[in-house]
Image (cartoon, rainbow, N blue to C red):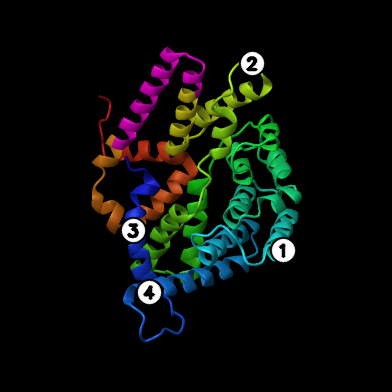
Amino acid sequence: MQTGLSRLTFLAPVLSILIVGAFSGAALGQSDSPDEIAERQMEVDLQAAAQWMLEQPEPVRQAAGLLLQQKSESSSSQTTDNPEALQARIADLLDQSDDPLTLALLATVCHQAGIQNRCLDLGLDEAIIEHDQGNAISLSYLFPGSSERFENALLSTRKVDDYLFPIAEIWDRALEEFLDVGTDTERHMLASFGASAIVNAVSIPGYSGLRGSCEDEIGESALALACVRAFELANHSSNNLLLRLVGLGLAKERALVAGDEALADQIETEQQNLQSRIHCIYQEIPESHWSESNEFTSNWIRSAASLGEVGAIEVLGKHYNVDCST
């Protein structure tokens, strides 16, 4: 099924087309193909946008710019050419802010750049535990795969949130200012669609730390109870569809490991019902709203950032009088 961000993934080619028209690119070789030109111009322009964000006074925008810079520089590789400088910049932002969203962005930067150990040396995991209730998703960016240190951190988890839509909102608002959209519809579309495309493109650990540490953990140990709590938080406290489905999926796997097939079937039914209902609502919203309306897209991002994806899509369902009760 398609979620709010995945539904906008098809707009990524639009981003590359619009961004070339909206910005001035680097010097181009005469022998380059149109695809190569568009790809290089998009990279240069994303770097310009990232640099602009890094110059803003708000730490959360700087952190978002740092992540965008890593994406535009490293592309598919998860390394950085200057880990010492990046570590110093992260340390500076940690000194400036203990805002949970800023911490989540910095953890994602650490994962994207492959400098998790350096970030652990800075105490980023401790900051997440202290200031973001040990958010398991943010911590998982710092611990790819299971580890004793992650399992110890998981004991402090009281929150499970991936912040995908709040991150998209930060980029949406920042790109609007960077592009000086005003009443320019094309530039407004670039900002809204671009924010969604960038979020889709950012490498994520796939909840591997949580899965690796918890999927076989049963019984009444402290870690087993922490895993149960994390799954419940993902399913019941989160309002993002992907995270809720992941939480349910991990809970189902754990039930199967414990030999409780009845519970596993119950969880699978809950998972399917949630997925079917949200998919039904998405299907009833006119396709043109997603692909043609910059105002709709921007409002959607901001609504989902505030209410979560599930809450925002329920509001849309009521607005369009969608009946997905059966």
Q: Earlier in the sequence, mark 3 or mark 4?
A: 3
Q: CA distance from mark 4 to mark 1?
A: 31 Å
Left or right placement of residue 75 versus residue 128 in this view? left
Q: Which mark is residue 119?
A: none
**At label 2, which amino acid type do we have?**
Glu
Q: Earlier in the sequence, mark 4 or mark 1?
A: 4
Left or right placement of residue 20 versus residue 92 in this view? left
Bounds of the magenta segment: 254-279
**At label 4, which amino acid type do we have?**
Glu
Magenta stretch: includes residue 156: no
Report the residue marked by disc 1: 84
Q: CA distance from mark 2 to mark 1?
A: 42 Å
Residue 266 quadrant: top left
- As helix, strand or loop, the secondary structure at mark 3 comes to helix
Q: CA distance from mark 3 to mark 4?
A: 19 Å
Q: Would you say the residues marked 4 and 1 are in contact, meaning their CB atoms lie under 8 Å apart?
A: no
Q: Would you say the residues marked 2 and 1 are in contact, meaning their CB atoms lie under 8 Å apart?
A: no
Note whether residue 240 is visible.
no
**At label 1, which amino acid type do we have?**
Glu
Q: Would you say the residues marked 3 and 4 are in contact, meaning their CB atoms lie under 8 Å apart?
A: no
Please determine whether, in this image, residue 37 is positioned above or below residue 314.
below
Q: Position of residue 119 (x, y in %)?
A: 70, 51
Q: Nearer the viewer, mark 3 or mark 1?
A: 1
